[in-house]
């Protein structure tokens, strides 16, 4: 989506059927892995489901705990390998600041992502503004730097938290 206008992943709203989000993410993952000739194993698929289980960021150890609670004999390397695979396929993003993962709402191609992280409720919105990515690449190029990946994390207050504090 590099040439599209800025896109913001929607926050869940009243009446939101989260099963649709999970189903769409799994369908997109199947298509993406098929295009790339990659295997979406049962463990990888389940980790992706758990990441999409809510719209909140989730840490690797929370994923491990969830797998163990389901009776799976999982260890940290299992979860980290699954997450690395999902990152490589563009199906999830890692939020460095939170040391957590969120599902990518548009994994069909490489894109620069900007994340808006609410300091109050922890909600994360993905803002994809090609102009921001282009400005970073242009500035880096002026300095002789080649950008291979860019993720920007911005902290503040989401609309709901701003209303509550007003």
Image (cartoon, rainbow, N blue to C red):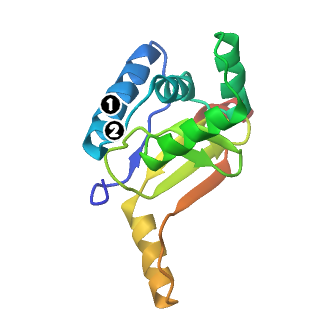
| Residue at x 43% of width, y 80% of height | 138
| Residue at x 64% of width, y 10% of height | 70
Query: Looking at the rendering, which quadrant does residue 9 occupy?
Result: top left
Query: Looking at the rendering, which quadrant does residue 5 occupy?
Result: bottom left
Can you name the residue that lies furthest to the front here?
Answer: 73
106 left or right of 45 in image: left
User: Label 1: which residue?
Assistant: 30
Residue 74 % position (x, y): 67, 24
User: Label 2: which residue?
Assistant: 33
- Note whether 130 is above or below 136 in the view shown: above
130 left or right of 126 in image: left
- Note whether 100 is above or below 21 in the view shown: below
Residue 114 % position (x, y): 52, 54
Residue 37 % position (x, y): 30, 42
- Note whether 109 is above or below 76 in the view shown: below
Q: Is residue 113 visible?
A: yes
Q: Is residue 121 visible?
A: no
Can you name the residue that lies furthest to the bottom here?
Answer: 143
Q: Nearer the viewer, residue 95 or 77?
A: 77
92 left or right of 39 in image: right
Residue 21 % position (x, y): 41, 23
Q: Label 1 neighbourhood size at 10 Å, few (<14), some (14-19), many (20+)?
A: some
Contact between labelled residues 2 and 1, with CB atoms less than 8 Å apart: yes
Q: Nearer the viewer, residue 57 or 123?
A: 57
Q: Quadrant of the C terminus?
A: top right
114 left or right of 60 in image: left
| Residue at x 49% of width, y 16% of height | 14
Circle count: 2
| Distance of label 1 from label 2 (alpha carbons) | 5 Å
- Note whether 88 is above or below 164 in the view shown: below
Q: Secondary structure at mark 1?
A: helix
Q: Label 2 neighbourhood size at 10 Å, few (<14), some (14-19), many (20+)?
A: some
């Amino acid at each position: 989506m590099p040439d599209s206008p800025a896109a913001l992943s929607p926050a869940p709203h009243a009446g939101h059927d989260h099963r649709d989000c999970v189903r769409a993410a799994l369908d997109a993952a199947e298509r993406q892995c098929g295009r790339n000739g990659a295997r979406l194993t049962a463990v990888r698929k389940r980790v992706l489901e758990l990441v999409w289980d809510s719209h909140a960021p989730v840490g690797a150890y929370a994923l491990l705990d969830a797998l163990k609670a389901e009776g799976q004999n999982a260890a940290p390397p299992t979860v980290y390998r699954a997450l690395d695979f999902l990152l490589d396929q563009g199906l999830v993003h890692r939020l460095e600041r939170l040391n957590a993962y969120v599902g990518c709402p548009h994994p069909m191609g490489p894109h620069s992502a900007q994340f808006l992280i609410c300091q109050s409720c922890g909600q994360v919105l993905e803002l994809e503004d090609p102009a921001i990515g282009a400005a970073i690449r242009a500035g880096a190029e002026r300095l002789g730097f080649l950008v291979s990946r860019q993720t920007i994390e911005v902290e503040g207050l989401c609309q709901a938290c701003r209303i509550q504090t007003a």
